Structures are given as structure tokens and as C-alpha cells.
Image: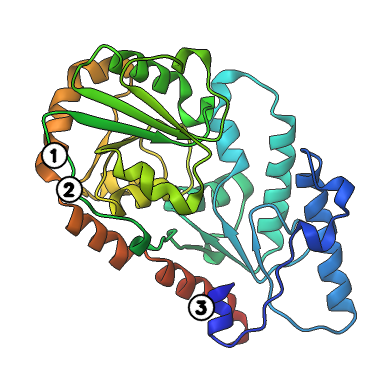
């Protein structure tokens, strides 16, 4: 929005406060009511003669032809990744339907990763010709690239919701292993309730209610970020970690997968089983310690994964219709 304004566009943010009555905003119902009311609001504007370009997100415009739909994730992909739970995922399946409708009605799609683009094409039948890959970006300047691995210890970190899809069972096993290691610690940043299995463990500390703007404090406390997620679009935490000089051990999902495939030296594949970290951890830690170069890591993110680059690509796709 700020980028569009700086480039001369007048922008209206269509959010819940604009279109959804107050009594419907809270709870799970709101996420299904908002797309319907947002589409209605857009159609009324269009029918009454207003001319505008619409940039939408995910499942928000199932019944309105947005000019550009930014696809950050995939409910369909998340359901597939969590199939082992054998849950019904009724709400998530409805979101997946809204996603598909939004994708099919949009003129162009900006998919944040190659895997998300594949999901759009294969799971929702979207034409490849209207799907473009635009990797997420961050403002690297708000993070500190301080020296890491400054002594013989290793400081691990995890940030995110404490749920199955984010790799909670894996994280619990790692935390219980860390509790037995005198030279390994683990910092967890989350807004979730803390499971009993993560409470009272030696060498494990928990940061609560850390705002997105204050995540730099978390990265300052760790050397290696753990990403045991089962599914990601193109997660910002991996970009933030690298911008902070923090190396990454993760599953082959989202940005982590892209960096592993491209051979980025500061990102390595997390062992498939948490128990294997006990045997493989020392070697992985040593490799990341040797490769650690906080200045180069921050420069890499600033050059190739900046907010400015992301916004410029989004703006170009959104205006493509009028050129």
C-alpha cells in the first residue's frame, strides 16, 4: 500500500473494519464472512461507475475478478501436508474452495514460491500463463547482523505457532534433547499456549508476545534457526533469520527449500527425525559455524529479497492490465 502511494496511486484498504459489522469480526466465522462482503463492496463500487485496480490476497475475492491475487500460502497444500492427522479440516476446506474461486476469477496470480505456483496449477487447475512467481521480501535494515557462534556453545531458536503443522512434535523432541546438553540451548518465541512438554526444561527459554517489529531481539539471542514446518509458502522467518546473521536448519518447504536447492551456504536440511539431530547435530552445527558470515548474509537478503523488490514486482503485475 505504501509503495503504491509513493508511486502516485490512491489506495483504499478493504479490510474487516470497512465491510464487516462489528459483531461478526471475532471468531472463526469472520474469515468466511469477510470475503463475501468484500466482494459485494467491490461489485457495488464497480457497478456505480468507479474505476480501480484490485490487488487481493489468497481467498479474499472468490466472487470478484481481482486484477492481481497474491498467493502467500495454500489451504489445499496445508491440508495435504497434514493428511497424517486424519482430521476433517472443514473450515480449511472451505477456505481452499474460496482460494480456488479467487484464483480462477483473478486476471493474474503472484505466487510467493515455485511450489505455491505448482499447487495453483495442479490443485486448482489454474492456467500456468497467468501465474507468476514473486518471492516474499523483508526490510533487512531493521535486523542486526551481529557475530554468531561466539563461544563453544550453540544457541538454537524457533519462532511460530506451537502446532502440528509447524512441527511441534519435532520441536518437543529437540527441546527434550537440548535439556540434556550442557553446550546447547533453545529459545522459543510464540504467541501460543505452551504445551506441558515444553515447560520447565533446562536450557530452554520461551519469549511470549514478541511483536513482529521486535523480532530482532529474538534473533539476537540465537545462532541457528530451526524450521521443522510441514508446509510453508515462502516464510518470512527464514529471510529474517538470514538478515540477522542467523543460520537456518529446516525442512524442504517454502524459502528454506529454495535456499537448500540453490546451495545457499547458510541454510541446511534438518534431519528427517528429531532423534537424528542428536547424532548429526554436531557436524551440522560445525558446518554452519564455519560458513557463518553475518555481513554477507544480511547483504544477500537486502539485495535479492527486499521489500522494495517485492513491491516493485507486485506493482508491475497489478498495472500490467492497463499498459
Name the quadrant of the C terminus.
bottom right
State the colouring used for the structure image: rainbow
Q: Dot 3 corresponds to which residue?
A: 316
Q: CA distance from mark 1 to mark 2?
A: 7 Å
- Front label number (2 vs 3): 2
Helix, strand or loop under label 1: loop
Residue 220 image point, x, y percent: 30, 45
Identify the residue at horizontal 83%, vertical 77% (top origin). 46
Name the side, left or right, on which 59 lies relative to 46: left
| Mark 2 vs 3, N-terminal side | 2
Identify the residue at horizontal 55%, vertical 47% (top origin). 73
**Callout 1–callout 3 Cβ contact below 8 Å:** no
Q: CA distance from mark 2 to mark 3?
A: 38 Å
Residue 121 image point, x, y percent: 55, 52
Residue 255 visible to an observer of this rendering:
no
Residue 164 image point, x, y percent: 53, 25
Identify the residue at horizontal 86%, vertical 46% (top origin). 24
**Callout 1–callout 2 Cβ contact below 8 Å:** yes
Q: Nearer the viewer, residue 281 or 198?
A: 198
Q: Is residue 300 above or below residue 77?
A: below
Q: Is residue 82 above or below residue 17?
A: above
Identify the residue at horizontal 42%, vertical 18% (top origin). 172
Q: CA distance from mark 1 to mark 3?
A: 43 Å
Q: Is residue 206 above or below residue 117?
A: above
Q: Dot 2 corresponds to which residue?
A: 147
Helix, strand or loop under label 2: loop
Name the side, left or right, on which 279 lies relative to 303: left
Q: Nearer the viewer, residue 312 or 76?
A: 312
Q: Dot 1 corresponds to which residue?
A: 150
Answer with the quarter of the image where residue 180 lies: top left
Name the quadrant of the N terminus.
bottom right
Amino acid at each position: 500500500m505504501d509503495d503504491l502511494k509513493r508511486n502516485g496511486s490512491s489506495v483504499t484498504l478493504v479490510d474487516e473494519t470497512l465491510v464487516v459489522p462489528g459483531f461478526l469480526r471475532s471468531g472463526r466465522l469472520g474469515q468466511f464472512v469477510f470475503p463475501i462482503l468484500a466482494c459485494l463492496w467491490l461489485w457495488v463500487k464497480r457497478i456505480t461507475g468507479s474505476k480501480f485496480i484490485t490487488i487481493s490476497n489468497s481467498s479474499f475475492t472468490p466472487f470478484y475478478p481481482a486484477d492481481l491475487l497474491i498467493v502467500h500460502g495454500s489451504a489445499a497444500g496445508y491440508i495435504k501436508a497434514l493428511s497424517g492427522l486424519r482430521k476433517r479440516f472443514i473450515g480449511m476446506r472451505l477456505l481452499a474452495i474460496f482460494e480456488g474461486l479467487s484464483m480462477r476469477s483473478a486476471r493474474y496470480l503472484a505466487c510467493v514460491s515455485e511450489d505455491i505456483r505448482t499447487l495453483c496449477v495442479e490443485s486448482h487447475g489454474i492456467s500456468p500463463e497467468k501465474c507468476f512467481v514473486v518471492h516474499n521480501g523483508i526490510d533487512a535494515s531493521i535486523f542486526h547482523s551481529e557475530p554468531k557462534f561466539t563461544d563453544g556453545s550453540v544457541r538454537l531458536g524457533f519462532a511460530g505457532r506451537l502446532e502440528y503443522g509447524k512441527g511441534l512434535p519435532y520441536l518437543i523432541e529437540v527441546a527434550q534433547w537440548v535439556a540434556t546438553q550442557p553446550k546447547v540451548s533453545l529459545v522459543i518465541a510464540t504467541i501460543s499456549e505452551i504445551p506441558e512438554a515444553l515447560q520447565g526444561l533446562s536450557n530452554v527459554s520461551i519469549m511470549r508476545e514478541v511483536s513482529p517489529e521486535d523480532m530482532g531481539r529474538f534473533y539476537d539471542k540465537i545462532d541457528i534457526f530451526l524450521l521443522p514446518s510441514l508446509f510453508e509458502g515462502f516464510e518470512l522467518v527464514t529471510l529474517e533469520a538470514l538478515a540477522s546473521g542467523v543460520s537456518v536448519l529446516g525442512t524442504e518447504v517454502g524459502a528454506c527449500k529454495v535456499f537448500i536447492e540453490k546451495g545457499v551456504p547458510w541454510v541446511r536440511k534438518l534431519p528427517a527425525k528429531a532423534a537424528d539431530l542428536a547424532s548429526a547435530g554436531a557436524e551440522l552445527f560445525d558446518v554452519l559455524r564455519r560458513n557463518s558470515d553475518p555481513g554477507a548474509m544480511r547483504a544477500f537478503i537486502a539485495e535479492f529479497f527486499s521489500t522494495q523488490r517485492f513491491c516493485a514486482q507486485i506493482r508491475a503485475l497489478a498495472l500490467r492490465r492497463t499498459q
